[in-house]
Amino acid sequence: MNLSKLILFFYNHKLYKEIRTSEKFQYLKPEDIRKYQENKLKKIIEHSKKNVPYYKYKLDEFETINDLWKIAFLEKKSIIGNEDLLCAKNLPKKRFLKNSTSGSTGDSLNFYSDRENYCRKAAVVRGNSWAGLKYGRRQLHFWGAERDIDKRKSIYKKLKHRYVTPNKMLSTYHLSEDDIKEYIEIYNKYKPDVIVSYPSPLMHISDYIRSQDLNVWSPSGIILSSETTYDFQRKNIEKTFKSRVYNRYGSREFGHIAAECTHHRGLHYNSDRFVLEVVDEKGNLCKPGELGEIVITDLDNYVFPLIRYKIGDLGILTDKQCTCGIKLPLLEKVEGRTFDLVIGTNGNIVAGSFWTLLRNEVKGWEKFQIIQENLGELKVIVEENPRMRVDFENEVGRHIKEKLGEDMVIKVNRVNQIGLTRSGKFKWIVSKVSPYVS
């Protein structure tokens, strides 16, 4: 046992115990994993029926895990204005941790996390270990959520993140050339075991490192989260830092949902924490291998239960088993947000992967943003760069029309810089015509 775990054993034995349970759980037989998951689901359903006003008459048809699909979806618009109805009435207020989404891709959502949800924290430790981060080793965040960075100001947080779980956080809101120079100096001196970052800011930093031909520390792994990670970003960052990238899928509502292991054949999702479904635009369950909207039931948040919650992301489930030895089920991929789908006049619907392939096809297609506000029309905003050809607009337009219809109206606009969202992330695609957006 390392020193950090020893401290945890005495200071927070509940979390220590949950981490040990979580480590063992990932190697259980699939049938035992399912039994464990179903038992937790029954408990959260029964609790919600008795103690959460919103669910009083909404869960009557549930008897087994196979009946979950009978329960109506919980959507963000149903929660807004009804927050009090979703609060458990039998639990003390000290368990309620006020939380909210950033609102970077829509309306901000206010909700409560459960302070006694140690399984949530343990799942993060487990997922970090797949990227080479052992408990108590150093990590460095390039992060955009200022509220997370501000928490470091408390004495408790400062001590914890210096001596128990060393963690340095640098804000992606500040990425001028001078900021990046300072960050690289801090990073090389700190020598973290793992970097955790949004993909877009780290790629921006990576581009600067390569343009200046700088030498940087190579960590054991790099965890990319909170945005869709595209292949060109992965390759760019891995080449710069000489380290493997591990994609993580998470959210403010649920924390760490799924992550890649060393085999990189999909993302293991935390089935000890969630029941995860994928549904089509009509709400029907998708078959393995089919793209649809991700629906999540949280098995551990007793203060503010989220049952069959439409998180707003697209993904593909697979029934294949990973060869790494971890038995947690797999998400084949996360394709982005439900409003990341673009529709052509020929009826074709394309997700983010189409644009990354197009980026490889057309020279000068570096940082870009796709906006579709109306059917039949598409705006392409692209940052100017020296590799961009004079006939760039025509070439991009030709490729898009081949995929989405010859009568599509394509408007290409060159700009000096495309800004981040207010949460410090970058939106590659903005669509108001997605079939999943009501």
Image: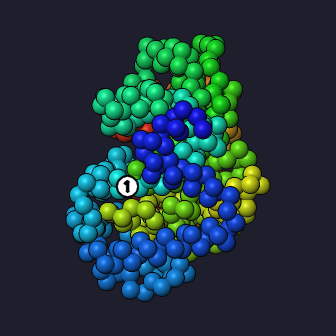
Residue found 47% across the figure and 36% down from its top: 7
Is residue 221 visible in the rendered structure shown here?
Answer: yes
Dot 1 falls on a residue whose secondary structure is: loop
Left-right relation of 323 to 23: right
Residue at horizontal 27%, vertical 51%?
98
- Left or right, 406 with respect to 92, comes to right
- The residue wearing badge 1 is 116
Could you tell me which quadrant the N terminus lies in?
Answer: top right
Counting from the top left corner in percent of width and height, residue 87 is at 27, 65
Taking the view exactly as shown, the residue that stands out farthest to the front is 10
Residue 213 % position (x, y): 64, 13
Relative to 421, does residue 306 appear above or below in the rendering? Answer: below
Q: Where residue 139 appears, x then y in whole percent?
A: 53, 31
User: Measured along the vertical axis of the image, is residue 53 above or below residue 196?
Assistant: below
* Mark 1 neighbour density, 10 Å: few (under 14) some (14–19) many (20 or more): some
Q: Which quadrant of the structure image shows residue 134?
A: top right
Q: Nearer the viewer, residue 279 or 401?
A: 279
Residue 57: image quadrant is: bottom left
Q: Across the whole image, how many numbered discs are drawn on residues?
A: 1
Q: Nearer the viewer, residue 73 or 168?
A: 168
Q: Pick the quarter of the image with the C terminus.
A: bottom left
Near-viewer residue (91 or 252): 91
Q: Residue furthest right?
A: 323
Instruction: Please give the name of the residue rendered at 38% of the width and 69% of the height, measured from the top-left corner.
Output: 74
Residue 382 point in image, percent of width and height: 51, 34
Q: Residue at x 71, y 44 (%)?
A: 262
Quadrant hosting residue 29? bottom right
